[in-house]
Image (cartoon, helix red, strand yellow):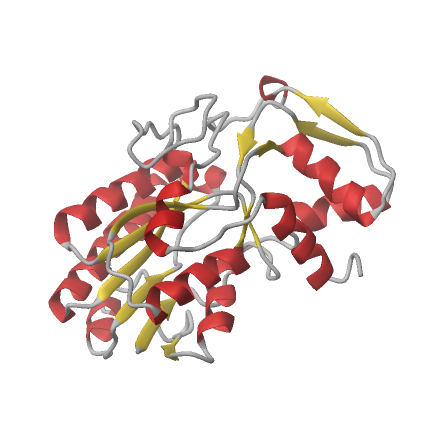
């Protein structure tokens, strides 16, 4: 199988590349060779022969997105539509990643069939991309992923949430973490394993899927679990979301129901603390 992987230098793309390079022929062009804002990029991609196109390219900084909506939609929506059209022309499978932020906040786990209500420009651009893909090409997988963490930090950042909490705790910095915003922490390694199975087993149950670790927690619970596992005694102060006074609105509960992906892909996904422990071992925070 030939796979074209876009965004292979990022947190998610690097994990997928690491997983697939032993199993498939992976083409992973650099940012320099494929400038995603260049109008000629679509023509260059169209010349590449592939069976799967995996798109990990996205503008994800919420503050930047809110201030630059045109650029955000150009990358997160318009460019995605171009990729979808290329896949349709080649009869290739399009694998794209959306976000848990499309969901409207509620207390239970969010399902793929639930009503969605983006609260910010970033989420709206991702929702629009989903609509464009669905209306254009039948052979697609859209994975709504949440609160991602991986060996490589997010683009433009030195650390992910886990590494940041540990560093600050080691310096005895005061930690204030929100305790009424809930999510499903997701390992980039887990996502890569699912993508590997999708290709290896030639899964064809196309559509939109939630993809995350099993279960939910608040950011406060997550931070406490991190410090407990690594053995750092540092008191975390719980705060309410409205105390943060954030300029950009975020949903209060984006925890995901993953029963659809488990059923259709026939995979076993463990609780979020299992993947946290695995990550901490891989980063040598614990033995």
Front-lying residue, 206 or 135 = 206
Residue drawn at point x = 12 percent, y = 67 percent: 89
Residue 23 lies, in percent from the top left, at 42, 79
> In the rendered image, is residue 122 in sight?
yes
* Residue at 42% across, 73% down: 30
In the rendered image, which quarter contains the C terminus? bottom right
Locate residue 286, reporting x and y percent.
79, 57
What is the quadrant of residue 169 in the picture?
A: top right
Residue 72 position in % (x across, y down): 35, 45
| 41 vs 235, nearest the viewer | 235
The N terminus lies in which quarter of the figure? bottom left
Along the horizontal axis of the image, is 252 left or right of 201?
right
Q: Quadrant of residue 215?
A: top right
Q: Position of residue 67 (x, y in %)?
A: 42, 37
In the displayed structure, would residue 20 be above or below residue 121? below
Up-down relation of residue 5 to residue 240 (above or below): below
User: Which residue is at a point 39% across and 28% down the rendered structure image?
Assistant: 119
| Residue 38 horizontal side relative to residue 280, left or right | left
Residue at 83%, 37% (x, y): give it: 173
Q: Quadrant of residue 282?
A: bottom right
Q: Is residue 14 left or right of residue 2?
A: right
Counting every numbered tag in the picture gives 0
Say if residue 121 shows up in the picture: no
Vertical placement of residue 190 versus 29, above or below: above
């Amino acid at each position: 199988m030939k796979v074209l992987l876009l965004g292979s230098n990022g947190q998610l793309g690097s994990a997928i590349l690491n997983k697939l390079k032993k199993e498939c022929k992976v083409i992973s062009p650099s940012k320099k060779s494929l400038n995603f804002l260049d109008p000629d990029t679509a023509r260059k991609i169209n010349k590449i022969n592939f069976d799967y196109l995996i798109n990990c390219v996205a503008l994800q900084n919420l503050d930047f997105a809110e201030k630059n909506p045109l650029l955000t939609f150009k990358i997160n929506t318009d460019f995605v539509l171009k990729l979808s059209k290329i896949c349709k022309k080649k009869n290739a499978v399009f694998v794209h990643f959306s976000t848990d932020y499309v969901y409207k906040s509620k207390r239970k786990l969010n399902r793929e069939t639930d009503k969605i209500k983006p609260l910010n420009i970033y989420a709206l651009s991702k929702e629009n991309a989903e609509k464009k893909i669905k209306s254009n090409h039948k052979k697609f997988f859209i994975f709504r992923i949440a609160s991602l963490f991986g060996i490589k930090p997010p683009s433009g950042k030195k650390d992910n949430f886990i590494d940041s909490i540990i560093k600050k705790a080691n310096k005895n910095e005061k930690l204030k973490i929100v305790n009424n915003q809930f999510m499903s922490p997701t390992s980039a390694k887990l996502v890569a394993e699912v993508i590997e199975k999708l290709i290896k087993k030639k899964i064809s149950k196309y559509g939109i899927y939630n993809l995350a670790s099993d279960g939910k927690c608040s950011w406060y619970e997550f931070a406490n679990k991190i410090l407990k596992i690594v053995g750092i005694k540092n008191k975390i102060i719980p705060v309410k979301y409205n105390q943060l006074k954030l300029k950009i609105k975020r949903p209060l509960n984006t925890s995901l129901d993953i029963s659809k992906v488990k059923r259709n892909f026939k995979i076993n996904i463990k609780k979020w603390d299992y993947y946290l422990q695995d990550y901490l071992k891989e980063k040598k925070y614990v033995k």
